[in-house]
Image (cartoon, rainbow, N blue to C red):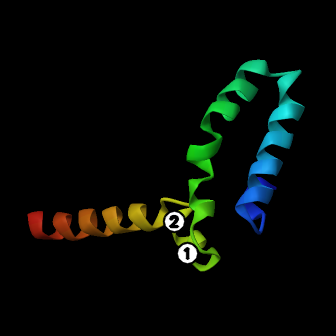
Amino acid sequence: TVFVQETAEAAHAQWRAVCDQLELKWPRLAAMMHGTEHEVLAFMDFPKEHRAKIHSTNTLERLNGEVKRRADVVGI
């Protein structure tokens, strides 16, 4: 639910709510999440139309796979 929020403020608030829920059962996980909040949600600072492209590394992985595929053909 954190990553589908409309605004950065809502995403940060949801992130903290999830951390608070996890704190009793998994305190180490909650502590790690508190420490990484701003890094994980950095993509929310960009305009909404750009977020779909930068919230994941799928585009980069696709590019690397294509380069590897073409390099293998040349190597043969």
Residue drawn at the location 76% of the way across and 64% of the way down: 4
Q: Quadrant of residue 5?
A: bottom right
Residue drawn at the location 25% of the way across and 67% of the way down: 67
Q: Name the one closer to the observer, 23 or 68.
A: 23
Q: Name the one closer to the observer, 29 or 8.
A: 8
* Marking on residue 31: none
The N terminus: image quadrant: bottom right
| Separation of marks 1 and 2 at Cα, in angstroms | 7 Å
x and y percent of residue 54 in the render?
Answer: 51, 65
Whether label 1 touches label 2, CB < 8 Å: yes
The amino acid sitting under disc 1 is His
x and y percent of residue 9 in the render?
Answer: 75, 57
The amino acid sitting under disc 2 is Ile
Mark 1: secondary structure: helix
Residue drawn at the location 87% of the way across and 21% of the way down: 25
Q: Is residue 7 left or right of residue 65?
A: right
Q: Which residue is mark 1?
A: 50
* Marking on residue 54: 2
Disc 2 crowd, CA 10 A, few/some/many (<14, 14-19, 20+): some
Mark 2: secondary structure: helix
x and y percent of residue 22 in the render?
Answer: 84, 30
